[in-house]
Amino acid sequence: MHNKITPDIVKKMKIEKQKITALTAYDYSTAQIIDEAGIEIILVGDSAAMVVLGYPTTHEITMTEMSIFTKAVAKGTKRALVVADMPFGSYQTSIKNGTKNACKFIQYGANAVKIEGGSNYIIELTSHLTTQGIPVMSHLGFTPQFLNSIGGYKVQAKESEQAELILNQALKLEQAGAFALVLEMVSEYAAEYISEHLSIPVIGIGAGRYCDGQILVIDDVLGKYKDFTPKFAKKYINLNEMIGTAVKNYIYEVKTRAFPEKTHIFEMQEIEKEKLTYANNKES
Ligand code: KIV
């Protein structure tokens, strides 16, 4: 019934000028909900480091942790393309190591991997993976795994020189076989310029209105993660407040004996109650 979204379908959507929708997810039930809602791409983002595991940056998350999230999301997804984010340290040391870890994600149910950066090494890795049947989504602009080199959460490509540099890297990644590009926190004009000059779709996050698609972190969309909300994120509901209210109601009802009610309990037949020896002994 559901046609599985493939990298080719995503690329075709750009040609047909259909906007591509993407969100992150890290668990089974969320993946099910957003898949059934019709999202085209689900990214098991390394943002899980911050929004799920409470680490200060994405650097801390490991392959083991990302593997658990990837397996859960893959199980909950029928239609969307599941992309697993290669965490920091899982691909930097060698092509061999990067390939081994990318293969693991595919074995865990991902349909593609995402890799940050556009150096010659990343271009070579992208080419190697794609020729081995592992679709790659590239990630340029603000790349959180490069936080220490960038020196903070800074908007990228505000100057033409950097916009050209990003386009240049993106064109090489496209040539190496990447099927899409995530462009993060880039000036709108640069993002439009880059999108126009690439044949693969550009999925923007904080990259303005003219990319081929948009991606956001699910916890930002749902208003769940409250440590930090970027300017570019839109909160569609305030789950943080809603969860807080629900939990306060639960605490109140337990304290006041309003919960559980008769509908929540499991009965024991009268005959069985009579057989309880401790009760019978007490009466005699
Ligand atoms: O990890 C993540 O959630 C991401 C998105 C912000 C694109 O890389």
Image (cartoon, rainbow, N blue to C red):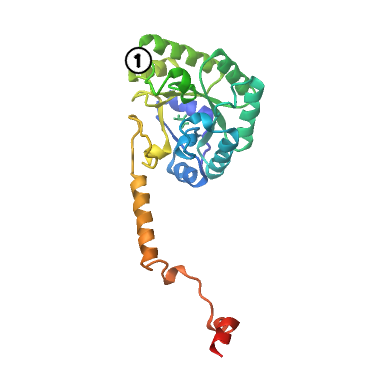
Q: Is residue 203 left or right of residue 120?
A: left
Identify the residue at horizontal 44%, vertical 11% (top origin).
Answer: 165
- Of 186 and 229, nearer the camera is 229
Percent coordinates x, y for residue 178 in the rendering: 53, 21
Q: Is residue 40 above or below residue 143?
A: below
Say which element carries label 1: loop
Kind of residue indicated by mark 1: Lys
Name the residue at the top extreme: 161
Q: Is residue 39 above or below residue 148?
A: below
Tell me the residue that label 1 is attached to.
158
Is residue 42 in sight in this rendering? Answer: no
Identify the residue at horizontal 51%, vertical 43% (top origin).
Answer: 27
Q: Is residue 107 left or right of residue 12?
A: right
Q: Is residue 130 above or below residue 30?
A: above
- Of 72 and 40, nearer the camera is 72
Badge 1 crowding class, 10 Å Cα cut-off, few under 14, some 14 to 19, many 20 or more, is some
Percent coordinates x, y for residue 276 in the rendering: 58, 81
Percent coordinates x, y for residue 76 in the rendering: 53, 44
Identify the residue at horizontal 36%, vertical 67% (top origin).
Answer: 256
